[in-house]
Image (spheres, helix red, strand yellow):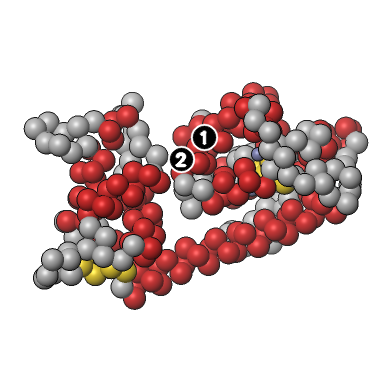
Amino acid sequence: MKEKRVKESEIVKPALKIIKDKPGITTSELIKELEKVVQLYPGDKEILKGRNDTKFSQIVRNLTSHKKNNKFWKCIDKEKEGINTGFYINEIGENEIQGYIKKEIKEEKLDNEFQRKIRESNVYRIDELIKANSRIPEKISRSSKARYKTDARISKTVLKENNYICEIEKLTGNKHKTFDTNNGTQYMEGHHLIPMKAQKNFENNIDRSDNICCLCPNCHRAIHYGTIKEKRTRLELLYNSKIKGLNYNKIYIDFEELINNYYI
Ligand SMILES: [Zn+2]
Ligand SMILES: [Zn+2]
């Protein structure tokens, strides 16, 4: 198997976001910032022969010097003269970033709705839960891009089964205290480990208790909005604790495939 490396295409989005926040940033500064947010594989950290440079920094240099990557170069301006030779987001880049933000807002809205539905739901009895878990996946509309229906009662049952304690708290032993709600329980959120947008890759329903996590809002937000490093540390714990249950239900996914679903 070929050794895994960060691809140039994977760093376009984080690079544009960094340039937006730090206009005028140079390539060497961009390398440092990207190293903080991109998950590097061992091969990326290798030092190039005869140079004081890692393979990863070479990837960034390729992106910023060759103008071959159209997507990146369409979105930025580079000052040609003067001392400052940094990068700036141009109008096309601004539109591109607005597109990322729109997508994030849409997902955030859907998740808010889902959390509300969970709060309003009743828990299932065990026989009802088995039936709901093993239902046939169903789309919201006929469109090929349509989302799949979720049943918030399953998530509510998962929260109850976890005694409203964050699963990452249980796996690490660190307390993740939130606050008490009017239902008399601690506030928690439900999250699909394999995101629902991946349902199309599975025959069996992934809106099922084995795929749902009970998370404190801090862990949940880190998984959705954190850097890939923040996502990875938490997802690895959850994956290892849940994969057996998923496999038992004939749902197979390796960790790298799972992570790919979290690069938005
Ligand atoms: Zn979530
Ligand atoms: Zn937590």
Q: Please give the residue where the numbered disc 1 appears in the rendered image.
A: 233
Mark 2 element type: helix
Q: Outermost residue, left direction?
A: 50
Ligand 2 falls in quadrant: top right
User: Looking at the image, which is closer to me, 207 or 78?
Assistant: 78
Res 246 seen here: no
Query: Which amino acid is tagged 1?
Result: Thr
- Residue receiving disc 2: 229
Q: Quadrant of residue 251?
A: top right
Question: Where does the image place residue 82, in percent across and percent down from the top left?
Answer: 12, 70
In contact (CB < 8 Å): disc 1 and disc 2: yes
Horizontally, residue 79 falls left or right of residue 201, namely left
Measured in 3D between alpha carbons, the distance from the residue under mark 1 to the one under mark 2, in whole angstroms, is 6 Å
Please indicate whether residue 252 sits to the left or right of residue 17 in the image. Answer: right
Residue at (80% x, 43% y) in the render: 186
Q: Position of residue 88 (x, y in %)?
A: 28, 68
Give the quadrant of residue 12: bottom left
**Nearest to the observer: residue 188 or residue 206:** 188
In the picture, measured across the screen, residue 63 lies left or right of residue 254, that is: left
Three-letter amino acid code of the residue under disc 2: Lys
Q: Quadrant of the N terminus?
A: top left
Residue occupying the point 89% across, 33% down: 127
How packed mark 2 is, by other alpha carbons closer than 10 Å (few <14, some 14-19, many 20 or more), is some
